[in-house]
Image: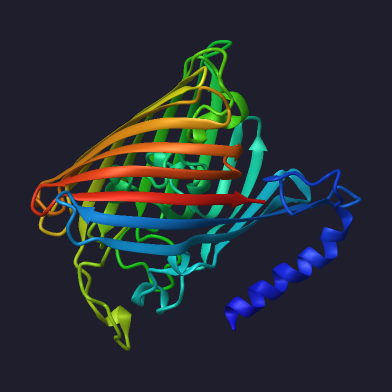
Amino acid sequence: MGKKIVFLLLFTTFKIFGQEQNKETFTIGKGIINHTSHDNLWSIQMNARMQLLSQFETSSQFKNFESSALLRRARFRLKGFLYSPKIRYKLELGFSNHDMRGGGSANHQTPLIIYDALVIWEFAKNFEFWFGQAKLPGNIERVISSGSLQFVDRSALNSEFNIDREFGLWLRHQFNLTDTFLMREKIAISQGEGRNVTIQNSGGYQLTSRLEFLPFGKFKENGAFFGSDLQREKKLKALIGVGFSLNDGATKERGSQGDYFLNLDPVQDQHALEMLKTDATTLFVDATLKYQGFSFLGEYADRKASDKTLIRTGKGLNLSMGYMPNKNWEVSARMASISLEQDTDNRKEYTFGFSRYFVGHNFKVQSDLSCIDFLNRKDQLVFRVQVELHL
């Protein structure tokens, strides 16, 4: 019933405002609805996007061949402002099975449809206050949208160490140290148990902070936060970031992500169970460079915990680069490694990618080939092809 209501709302919105658009105003990626009220007191932009994925896997000896094909993502996003352009909102919903997976006891066994739901208030020059559910300011690769990646998917480092989305409070600020040197500060206080949690907070809270240094000024069109150098920066641009997360009373195997330390599957009274808890910290260091079609991304992550029998502790490294001879296609390569103290799932991944861009990240076809060198099991070869369409 919930999904039917959401679809009805989206359909109604489209019928009301879609009539005001025409061939001259519609642009791929700029929204199937893009409307501002006559009194300039509110605006709405609705985007829809999908990812279609085919994947083929085999061992390094070309045995045990497997294949899969799926609608990986099907998303709707609403954004705009209310009352004043300084008060913005964002709502992002996911409707594919892949989008909605992960429901459990912490969210009453319901599909995880809601990704982002927040209000942003620019209360002073260069200051923003966020309230709601959104991505935490951890590693830069996680902050990049899944529709704007350089490869078919994010790296193994991101899969293991990212701190994803949570409900909380954010404070963001930026200022210029010199005419070109820009610095950004981001702080967030959140629940510490992931997104769409509906039960009472079982652990403590998570404090996340991040500093970003842009010594050569801003990237074109916020280019630090999408893969590849689509804008072909004429001058060298760089972003160096340091992030730190403290999860006080973490209750999941990866801090705020993964499974709970206790199995909470169908229990009448979730609050009657005593949760196992421990403190966890995660350090992120990353750098992004772009220049005339060349792009580089480097990331390092280090997770520690008071009780190593509960938290997956260890380190991760991700190095990737790509080159675009023109704006239509790109070749790229990536090396990522995971080294956990528990020796579970330790591996190195070597990935080579090819992307064909028709309308930037809004309409593209991407493919990559990965060789995964596992420490404790057989190596694996993975080939993937994905189509991305963003309206």
At a point 55% along the width and 18% down the height, the residue shown is 217
> Which residue occupies the foreground of this view, 11 or 201?
11
Q: What is the quadrant of residue 220 in the picture?
A: top right
Q: Position of residue 253 (x, y in %)?
A: 22, 59
Q: Is residue 2 above or below residue 15?
A: below
Identify whether 113 is placed above or below 61: below
Instruction: Give residue 360's position: percent from left, percent from top.
Output: 60, 37
Given the current orientation, which residue lies at the most extreme right position?
Answer: 38
When the figure is inspected, residue 200 is found, relative to residue 331, above or below; the finding is below
Q: Who is closer to the viewer here, 13 or 371?
A: 371
> Which residue is the extreme one toward the bottom?
268
Q: How is the image coloured?
A: rainbow
Judging depth in this view, the residue of 44 and 55 nearest the camera is 55
Residue 155, located in which quarter of the rendered image? Answer: top left
Task: Tell me: 372 left or right of 211.
Answer: left
Instruction: Name the quadrant containing residue 85.
Output: top right
Please tell me which residue lies in front, 254 or 146: 146
The answer to whether 250 appears left or right of 184 in the picture is: left
Judge whether residue 368 can be spotted in this image. yes
* Residue at 79% across, 47% down: 26
Residue 78 drawn at (x, y percent)? 67, 56
- Residue 86 pos. (x, y %): 71, 42
Count of labels shown? 0
- The residue drawn where x is 38% and y is 69% is 102
Q: Is residue 314 visible?
A: no
Which residue occupies 65% across, 34% down?
124
Q: Which of the image's four quarters has the N terminus? A: bottom right
